Amino acid sequence: SKEIPNVKIIIAGEGDLSSYYRYVEDKYKSKLEIHNEFIPNERVAELFMRSSLVVLPYTDHTTASGVLTIALSFGKPMVVTEVGELPTLCSNCALIVPPKNVEALAKAIIKLLKDEELRKELGRNSLKKAEELSWDNIAKMHMKVYEEVIAERKQ
């Protein structure tokens, strides 16, 4: 908030946030938009379209993230933590920070919000990654593997 006075943070999704409320000073509450509930499909697009970037501050070894795939499909630049497969999946479409490192997370968010060119580049890369991970491409990759296995068996 000190670095980017007009920042608005959207926190969306189901989960227990009660232990975090004590950390939010009254003067910062107006900068938060909290949707602490399951987000129905018809509201997902609106929230992503309003966002300049997506932050995935996972702390454990996440192997898959629905939010990640949606962020990619919307061409969003991201800040993700270095857990599970996130660094591999997001190597060129996100800034990657250590888990549970609040300072590194904040610096990466600020950097991305201040650097429009970097946001655009990472966003373009997100769209490319979404295309790579599309069901059509995954089906093509599977077909190629099947064809290779069949060809080897025929020999």
Image (tube, helix red, strand yellow):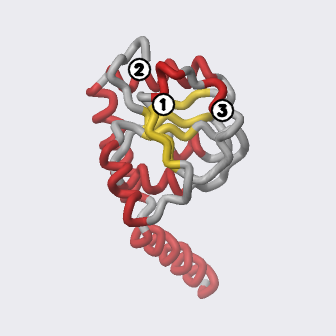
Q: Check disc 3 and report its element: helix, strand or loop.
A: loop
Residue 42: image quadrant is: bottom left
**Circle 2 is placed at which residue position?**
111
Indicate which disc residue 5 carries: none
Residue 149: image quadrant is: bottom right
Identify the amino acid type marked 1. Leu
From the viewer's perspective, is residue 127 above or below residue 99? below
Q: Position of residue 112 (x, y in %)?
A: 39, 26
**Circle 3 is placed at which residue position?**
20
Q: Position of residue 43 (x, y in %)?
A: 39, 59
**Circle 1 is placed at which residue position?**
95
Foreground: disc 1 or disc 3: 3
- Most extreme residue toward the bottom is 154
How many numbered marks does the figure carry?
3
Report if the CB atoms under discs 2 and 1 are less than 8 Å apart.
Answer: yes
Quadrant of the snapshot with the N terminus? top left
Return the disc, 1 or 3, that comes first in the chain's sequence: 3
Q: CA distance from mark 2 to mark 3?
A: 24 Å
Q: CA distance from mark 1 to mark 3?
A: 24 Å
- Most extreme residue toward the front is 26
Of residues 24 and 150, the one drawn nearer to the viewer in this rendering: 24
Identify the amino acid type marked 2. Lys
Of residues 125 and 114, the one drawn nearer to the viewer in this rendering: 114
Q: Check disc 2 and report its element: helix, strand or loop.
A: helix
Identify the amino acid type marked 3. Tyr
Q: Position of residue 30 (x, y in %)?
A: 42, 29
From the viewer's perspective, is residue 24 above or below residue 145? above
Return the disc, 2 or 1, that comes first in the chain's sequence: 1
